[in-house]
Image (cartoon, helix red, strand yellow):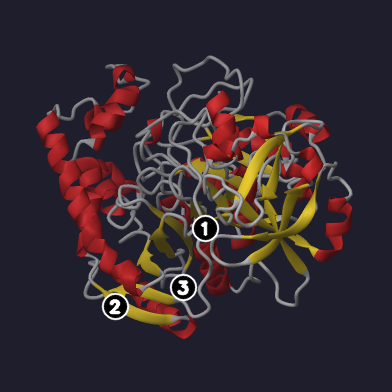
Amino acid sequence: MSDQPTFIHRLSPEEVAGFAAAAPDGPLAGTTFAIKDNIDLAGVPTTAADPRRTTPAVVSATAVQRLLGAGAVPVGKTNMDQYATGLVGTRSPYGACHSVYSLDHVSGGSSSGSAVAVAAGEAEFALATDTAGSGRVPAAFNGLVGVKPSKGLVPTTGVVPACASLDCVTIMARTVARGREVLAVIAGPDPLDPWSRTLEQRATPERPVVAVPAGDLDLDPLHQAAWELSVERARALWEVVEVDVSAFLEAATLLYGGPWVAERRLAFGDLLTDDPAVDPTVRAIVAGSPPVSAVEAFAAFHRLAALDAATRSVWAGADALLLPVTAAHPTLAEVAADPIGVNSRLGRFTNMTNLLDLCAVAFPGPVRGDGLPFGVQLLAPAGGDLALLDLAASWCGEEPARPAGGDRIDLVVAGAHLAGEPLNADLVARGGRFVRSARMESDYRMYVVDGPLPRPGVTRLPAGEPGEPTALAVEVWSLPATALAGFQATIAPPLGLGQVDLADGTRVLGFLCSADGVDPARDITAYGGWRAWRASLA
């Protein structure tokens, strides 16, 4: 919509054309994307909706660099709740956004412009962030898919922190398939990000069990009717069990009622001066919050641990938890009348996600009686990202990630083809899809071998040969069967492909090194994997 303050910095047609001309022929070649303006794009200021921040970024954020390397084309930096503090989309000196479905209803935030840009067709997908729900609430209010990965799965290098220990780079897309495609490109550890990590992804269950809340959720009437239809749809798709979600909801109250507000003060509190450029609600929440003592902080950590333990019974009996994204869809007038109270209610079903180390994906549910979209979300413990995307795809009527028929081949990669490593783009360009993280059987060893760039060579110890057992960290990707021969031709000796045994008992095609390429003086097995060895050098 042209009346929307969607962008803080919209790239000119000439700038967009320049990015398009320079884009490599990767898996996202020519795909346009928008970037929330707390994520760096080299040459453009990263304002975080604070107009006093005018210095252009020197380098792009890691996630942006990976997208550019995959051929994606940026179109601009999007509006947001200032310093990513808000779920409404109105806390910006650049103007308040509204839902693309209603001039009167909020867009949701803090990733307001990212959602509007995608929903209005100005970008094919967008990067956002989600600390308290900012990648899911605006998705729900604009009829989109919002992918909130597990903490650390996507690096936050080059992101203005809100709560550094909880921040996540997220994806706004019109389909689950697009969200999955983008996640495959931007996921993977970054040695420059102390919060990034490698996560083993769980397989999608053959017969999923999805939990839904037992009892009343205190939803607005229009939301309640849409939620009841959502539960009916869930029962038609999966086995559904009812669970007590009180521990989840109490954990949500800790985000702004506990010491994590102090983490925001640490990140940007010194910038919240009495200046017209500073949103007064953001200043009141962060700079105006009372000091938190170490005793109070530890008390909150202990309470969170107890609540986390109380949620484990849900995961013992269910693969995912289905929740509404919000309890209501407020109007701009309602937010203006009670900016903090309305915002707090919007985070009731999202604020706990990162505190409890969960991943989530939001997607459209049944349309409300007034025609506005209604969003639902699936949550699971960290490492359930791909399984959640498969469940969301089945809800949305999309094809599964790995089509039936045996037309794809699983492949174990251990070094330069890992997500985020130099040759991963070639794997993705050939149709490669990330399947899961894994570990090899403990009798394999890893060496540094020579080649066009540093590579690991993996060999298996002969039976009975001494060696410290180490289960090497690897990734399983899938390739179209028709692409395997061409991919194999790119592998330079002494590396080749052969059968690899994984710690979970499966046998998969993977990279192996011939005996003549092994130098015992360059044995790096003790590091546990290629990324860990590379991190030790940094």
The crowd level at tag 2 (other Cα within 10 Å; few <14, some 14-19, many 20+) is: some
* Secondary structure category for the residue under label 1: loop
Residue 297 screen position, x and y as percent: 16, 35
Q: Nearer the viewer, residue 34 or 242?
A: 242
Please, what is the three-letter code of the amino acid marked with disc 3?
Pro
Q: Is residue 77 visible?
A: no
Name the mark on residue 201. Answer: 1
Distance CA(mark 3)–CA(mark 2): 20 Å
Please, what is the three-letter code of the amino acid marked with disc 2?
Glu
Which residue matches tag 3? 366
* Secondary structure category for the residue under label 2: strand
* CB within 8 Å, label 3 to label 2: no
Asked if residue 10 is positioned above or below residue 516 in the image, the reply reads: above
Q: Nearer the viewer, residue 265 or 124?
A: 265
Asked if residue 222 is positioned above or below residue 341 in the image, the reply reads: below
Residue 236 screen position, x and y as percent: 47, 85
Which residue matches tag 2? 242
Q: Is residue 158 left or right of residue 19?
A: left
